Amino acid sequence: MIRIMFVCHGNICRSPMAEYIMKKLAADAGRDDIICASSATSTEEIWGDIGNPIYPPAKDMMHRRGIPFDEHHAVQLRRSDYAAYDLIIGMDSANIRNIMRITGGDPDGKIHKLLSFAGSSRDVADPWYSGDFSTAFDDIMTGCTALMAKL
């Protein structure tokens, strides 16, 4: 079993897109041994016991690109997730810094930036600020496809 946690700032755009893109790639490859989840480094999208759902433009982009998704609510990454997952994948450099802070470091080399699997040091474009969900989707698809090839 390979357990992957995708992480972004709020867990309503990039990390859920990565979770569901990777689930589709794994299903298409017949890899039922790959388990994916997503979480946030912040609590900005989490109110009480339940977090906000996937941001509507992110849902729309997944729908238009043929990526199935289900009910999702933002959750925050926890220190205990470090032990529970084989890979913890952030979308940008700020996410990586915050993941390290939350988990207390990376002694096992589990924490990576998504596009590093595609040989790039670039951050995944953040559609929250740009409104460009197409570029973010393409970046995430590139990273997830490269990750899938490595698995």
Image (spheres, rainbow, N blue to C red):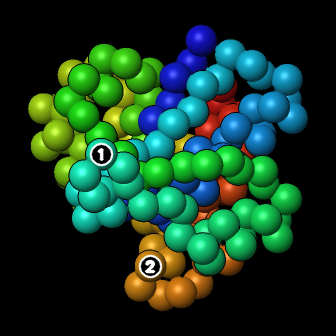
At a point 60% along the width and 25% down the height, the residue shown is 35
Q: Earlier in the sequence, mark 2 or mark 1?
A: 1
Tag 2: amino acid: Trp
Q: Is residue 70 left or right of residue 39?
A: right
> Can see residue 118?
no
Q: Estimate how packed mark 1 is, as few (under 14), some (14 to 19) or many (20 or more) residues with alpha carbons within 10 Å.
A: few
Could you say where residue 114 lies in the image, as x and y percent from the top left? 50, 49
At a point 82% along the width and 70% down the height, the residue shown is 64
Could you say where residue 89 lies in the image, as x and y percent from the top left? 43, 42
* Residue situated furthest top in the rendering: 1
What residue is shown with label 1? 49
Total of numbered circles in the picture?
A: 2
Tag 1: amino acid: Asp
Q: Is residue 38 left or right of residue 46?
A: right
What residue is shown with label 2? 128
Q: Estimate how packed mark 2 is, as few (under 14), some (14 to 19) or many (20 or more) residues with alpha carbons within 10 Å.
A: some
**Local SS, label 2:** helix
Q: Which mark is residue 133?
A: none
At a point 26% along the width and 64% down the height, the residue shown is 44
Q: Nearer the viewer, residue 12 or 25?
A: 12
